[in-house]
Image (cartoon, rainbow, N blue to C red):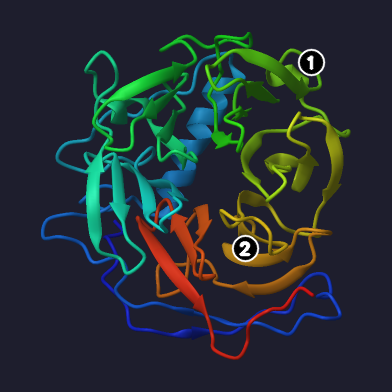
Amino acid sequence: MLRKSAMVTCVVLPVVAAALPAAPDARAQEYQLVPSWPNFPEGMFFGTDGGFADPAAREAAAQRRREAMAAGGQEPTPLPAEPGPQVYGTGVSGIAIDNEDQIYVFNRGVQTILVFDREGDFVRGGGERDMQGEQVMGGWLHSGEVDWEGNVWVVERRNQRILKFEPTLERVVMQLGTTGEAGNDATHFSDPSGISILRNGNIVVTDGYGNNRVVLFSPEGRFIRQVGLGAGGSDDVGTGPGEFDLPHQAALDADDNIYVVDRENRRIQVFDKDLNYMREFANEGWNPWDIAISREGDDGFGYIADHATEEVHKIQLSDGKILATWGKRGLGPGEFDWVHGMAVDSRGAVYAADTYGQRVQKFVPVPGSETTNR
């Protein structure tokens, strides 16, 4: 059984050659790991205290799920495993950042949302209960986001809903989707995967695992439109512009252009704020699971969680060219086990969450290696 990793010493991670050449005006860049981030209060941890089964056991569990789904069943919702660990469904599911550079960790554990400042000090936690007082962690958190007013949104994949918490994390003030009911209409999701909030308050949901669609809602939760091959569902897999094979996550630039991770098509599709298709880009061999863009969104860069090689890439948003790469598969310093969530703060520090690694790691540019985009 794999145990939670101890805090690590600082290491400098060399940049790997990019699959595509960097822009001519960009210098090579390196990132280094910030040691002992975050600073946990005594008794606090991410994920589950017992660790995870090894990769072979996890793959066997995943194969059983795939076979159940192929036979027309539903993916089973993991139940809390006491005293041992869960094989699937715990760990760190995602991260987000607010206007004050506070990092929100969406945790598949007893502590549902944990907030840290840029230095890694614990600020607050919460988000354990929904409007009815039921425990949120039972819905298997997949990701989350912080909107422009500081409200915190949580995607509960298996509960078929998205909850909006007030900034204190003490109270749910809005819900999208119908609790426990899958569907593909204006009031239902089927295993939703991600959420982004535009500056005008409109809401973008990647309804990815059961439905292959991206949905736009008003600030009040009114359905506006969707994009995808059809109404949504497993049969709506497509490879054309505005079609998806598991839209997984999304991020916004300064103009509220929406960069959607089309996971199994291994590409990023770009839409305007009204969900009109603009363009797409990809790199050979990658499998992006998440994309992060700074809150300002005006520097032209994005950061990709690449599950194919368990690496992080810094990319140029104009064309997807890779400017820097670091990390590898593993549980050591600067390594990842299912890198699943990304965030970048106002100073250019990059935060990466890996589900089975049960941690968030912070990386900063090596002085003198900063990338320019003039």
Please indicate whether residue 177 sits to the left or right of residue 45 in the image.
Answer: right
The residue closer to the viewer here, 11 or 175, is: 175
Residue situated furthest left in the rendering: 42
Q: Which residue is mark 1?
A: 230
Among numbered discs 1 and 2, the one appearing first in the sequence: 1
Disc 1/disc 2 C-alpha distance (Å): 32 Å
Horizontal side, residue 110 vs residue 43: left or right = right
Dot 1: element: loop
Q: Quadrant of the N terminus?
A: bottom left
What's the residue at 23%, 48% (across, down)?
124
Residue 290, percent across and down? 59, 49
Q: Which residue is mark 2?
A: 309
Is 109 located above or below residue 208 in the figure?
A: below
Q: Residue at x 23, y 44 (%)?
A: 125
Instruction: Tell me where residue 300 sits by quadrant.
Output: bottom right
Label 2 residue SS: loop
Q: On screen, 16 above or below 250?
A: below
Residue 7, position as x, y percentages in the image: 27, 73
Residue type beneath disc 2: Thr
Q: Is residue 264 left or right of residue 242?
A: left
Which corner quadrant of the image does residue 183 belong to?
Answer: top right
Q: Please state if 79 lies on the left or on the right of 94 as rendered.
A: left
Name the residue type under label 1: Gly
Give the x, y percent position of residue 59.
49, 45
